[in-house]
Image: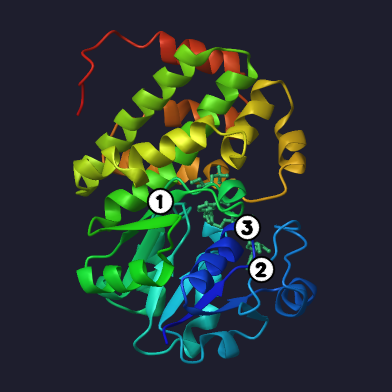
Amino acid sequence: MTKAAVFGTGSWGTTFAMLLAGAGTETILWGRRAEVVEAIDRRHVNPDYLPDTVLPDTLRATTDPAEALDGADFVVLAVPSQTLRGNLTAWKPHLPPEAVLVSLMKGIELGTTKRMSEVICEVAEVPQERVAVVSGPNLVGEIVLGQPAATVVACPDERVAERLQEACHLPWFRAYTNPDVVGVELGGAVKNVIALAVGVAAGMGLGDNVGAMLMTRGLAEISRLGAALGADPHTFAGLAGMGDLVATCTSPLSRNRTFGENLGKGMTLEEVIAATKQTAEGVKSCESVLELARKHDVEMPITEVVVAVVHDGMPPGEAGMLLMSRSPKPERYGV
Ligand SMILES: NC(=O)c1ccc[n+]([C@@H]2O[C@H](COP(=O)([O-])OP(=O)(O)OC[C@H]3O[C@@H](n4cnc5c(N)ncnc54)[C@H](O)[C@@H]3O)[C@@H](O)[C@H]2O)c1
Ligand SMILES: O=P(O)(O)OC[C@H](O)CO
């Protein structure tokens, strides 16, 4: 039987572990906090993140990384992106030599501008063929209700992608494979930044034309960065590109959109941070995405103003004026 160890008992780690267990994969969760782990293991509930969801009886949990990793075929990583390097360094001595490492994370590392799969290859010292990425329009609040959804499993080794696809595929959760890890990861990380912008606009009371403009021009930014980094342009028309962008930018369930919306309504950054209980990856990753774009000489004007609003205190109205007063250009400028 295929065995998976999922690291991170937050909303997506727990939900993806449910999907794996539901698909017949023997699954164990690792968590930091003993009380959450105990509740998952004994009472089949995650009181902090999914209090209304009954977890499968077969889903186990532990605080011991060695126990979680013992015999694991898939090591699934679902901690906040900026904590991955430190955590994985600690877990590395226990990693089974042949295990496939799977990233569920949608961020870019601050300081290095590395994608999560790059951090995994570097820290765990494994080749790209042993690292997979899962990303798509996967709002947890809908998936835990059993509503239909689809995702993308990306790995340069097609057989590895197919094994992981089989390990999480359910009648109501479709996994598609794609060899384009770069595109799938960029789609997941940058859509969070665009969702912050769309949220700010919604919070300011602006309408659907503005939202559509930001999403579409945001997709142009993602595509430009992807082209510079060697991604397959078709990926951005798929689930991990446009699909996740639309879901995140339009759903009230999105933490990134909600974060932006609160800023747009006039809350201070400190107030918004205090009101945000879960990980809104775009808040930190907007800076690393912008740094990555600058390294590759890619223009990302929406990302620039998101960084200015979220980190430098620029008033949202001024950010909007800056975007609207850019010089007129052809739609496909810079692509
Ligand atoms: N929630 C979703 O709908 C969703 C869907 C797809 C992808 N993702 C991505 O999955 C990743 C995880 O997100 P999430 O929604 O599970 O976040 P979350 O905020 O719900 O949970 C984060 C988990 O990490 C733990 N954690 C926090 N700091 C830590 C540290 N320093 N070391 C170890 N563990 C730590 C928390 O205790 C919690 O268990 C993110 O990159 C997110 O973008 C989330
Ligand atoms: O709640 P968000 O904004 O982190 O988005 C969750 C998922 O990434 C949607 O696919």
Question: Does the numbered disc 3 mark a residue whose Cβ is under 8 Å from ligand 1?
Answer: yes
Closer to the camera in the image, 235 or 18: 18
Mark 3: amino acid: Ser
Evaluate if marks 3 and 1 touch, with contact meaning CB atoms under 8 Å apart.
no
Q: Nearer the viewer, mark 3 or mark 1?
A: 1
Q: CA distance from mark 2 to mark 1?
A: 20 Å
Q: Element type at marker 1? A: strand
Of residues 144 and 204, the one nearer the viewer is 144
Image quarter in which the C terminus is found = top left
Q: Which sits earlier in the primary sequence, circle 3 or circle 2? A: 3
Residue 305: where, in percent of width, then height? 49, 25
Q: Tell me what residue is drawn at x 45 percent, y 12 percent.
A: 209
Q: Amino acid at mark 1?
A: Ala
Q: Position of residue 211 (x, y in %)?
A: 48, 20
- Residue at image coords 57%, 12%: 206
Nearer-the-camera pick, 335 or 256: 256
Disc 2 marks which residue? 55
Label 2 or label 1, whichever comes before in sequence order: 2
Q: Is residue 100 left or right of residue 230?
A: right
